[in-house]
Amino acid sequence: MEYTHRYHAFPTQTVAAELKRHIDIHRQAYNYTLYEYENVDADNIGSAYKHHYRLPDWKDEFPVFSEVNSKALQRTVTRFYQNLSNLKAQKDNGNTVGKLNWKSPREFRSMTFSQSGFELKNTSGRRATVELSKIGDLKIRYHRELPAEADIKEVTIKEETTGEWFVSFGLETDEAELPEKPDVDSLDASNSVGIDLGILNYIHTSDGIAVDWLELEVEYERLRREQRKLSRKDEGSNNYEKQRRAVAKVKRHIKRTVLDYQHKITTWLVTGYDAVFVEDLNVTGMLQGDGNARNKQDAAWRQFITLLEYKADLYGCHVVQVEAAGTTKECARCGVETAKPIWVREHSCPSCGFETGRDANAAMNVLQRGFEELGLGWPESTPVETVTATDADDFREVSARHVVETGSPTLKKRTASAVSE
Ligand SMILES: [Zn+2]
């Protein structure tokens, strides 16, 4: 399994200058690969693997290419061929594509060490150091540990348009070393959970936890303010450039806050349950309404599900996507469908009388569909019984800020164990 962990980096001025110099040499190598690909007629051009054999000649002709790590230099040649095949894939999909262009310094901001030339060291608490060959040491904010069984395949160093530096570790964990997933036959309503990805921006679990989505109004207001300022500057001026960075910084802050939050929620889910069921967003559009807001929310949920799936492998948990259509309309107890406009927040079944919250009902349906998907039939003690036994109003709400600050909704398995009693 391959995945990535990314960390904020804090190079000294000297190291930052070296990083920039190296990245610019890689940029020239990238452009030179393009030049040769288009203009040089030779046997060893046409694939990354073959093109690597030209590097000794490059170094003879342009000594500057000897100043960077040679594996990293190969990786840059590979990067060109990867871009080429991405472009081809887009073209095959019927998109209109141009051709690859020379990269300006603004468009080329990173380099990748592959297999060697780097070392992660001094990992203690929330700090660590990355040593890069021919460059030096780079301090990083080590906010989460790399899994012990992971191999570091690659290290990418990037300067964002905000001027901030980041280090990404390309990781690989052998399938054999991943924790085993719980036996499917051992799954029941006490250790599994259905998730409703809410229209009103929160997740609701089948065992009664509602976690609010992040409120980012303050951040978005700040973004609008910085964008208004930008629109008043003269494009190309120093002030414009300064303000452009300010805008990028706020955007990045929002993106990071959301990602951080999603990391916490998904880790909580895969460590707290043996199976997590979610709606399959690829089958049906989930949100009503249209335009930008919907796309944004869809993208956020997709990212959420991607994280959930990779963590499922990492922590040994089943994550299954189920058919999303009708989860809201269908009664979780008797299966009868009732039309439910978006503003109706309660589920009240005209057929069997089952009453609960709209999203709770949907989450229970997701749970049941998950069990069917795994060939288990309906869970023995369904959450429906728990809800009727206790009180539908008893559902707990957890704020997103609480999750961000404490790292978990702190309700891990509490409700679930109540179910099995
Ligand atoms: Zn019913």
Image (spheres, rainbow, N blue to C red):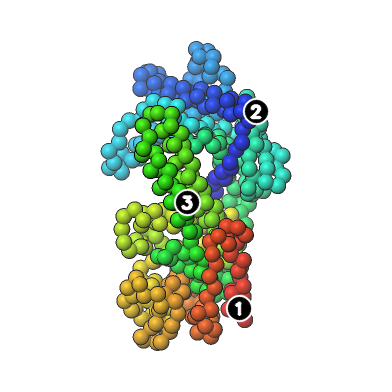
Give amino acid for label 3: Glu
Evaluate whether residue 278 shows in this view: no
Q: At numbered mark 2, what does the secondary structure look like: helix, strand or loop? A: strand
Q: Nearer the viewer, mark 3 or mark 1?
A: 3
The answer for how far apart the CA atoms under marks 3 and 2 are is: 36 Å
Q: Is residue 334 left or right of residue 393?
A: left
Residue placed farthest to the bottom in the image?
352
Q: Earlier in the sequence, mark 3 or mark 2?
A: 2
Q: Earlier in the sequence, mark 3 or mark 1?
A: 3
> Label 1 belongs to which residue?
418
Give amino acid for label 2: Gly
Asked whether the beta carbons under mark 3 and mark 2 sit within 8 Å of each other, the answer is no
Residue at the location (41% across, 78% down)?
346
Residue 288: give x, y in percent of width and height: 33, 63
Please identify the quarter of the rendering in which residue 35 is found.
Answer: top left
Residues 80 and 241: in front is 241
Residue 146: give x, y in percent of width and height: 63, 47
The answer for how far apart the CA atoms under marks 3 and 1 are is: 38 Å
Check the picture and name the quadrant holding the C terminus.
bottom right
> Label 3 belongs to which residue?
219
* Residue 241 marker: none
Please identify the quarter of the rendering in which residue 191 is found.
Answer: bottom right
Residue 53: give x, y in percent of width and height: 50, 22
Residue at the location (57% across, 32% down)?
113
Residues 323 and 101: in front is 101
Q: Earlier in the sequence, mark 1 or mark 2?
A: 2
Give amino acid for label 1: Ala
Assess disc 1: are there few (<14), some (14-19) or many (≥20) residues with their C-alpha within 10 Å of its C-alpha: few
Q: Is residue 412 left or right of residue 243?
A: right
Q: At numbered mark 1, what does the secondary structure look like: helix, strand or loop? A: helix
> Label 2 belongs to which residue?
136
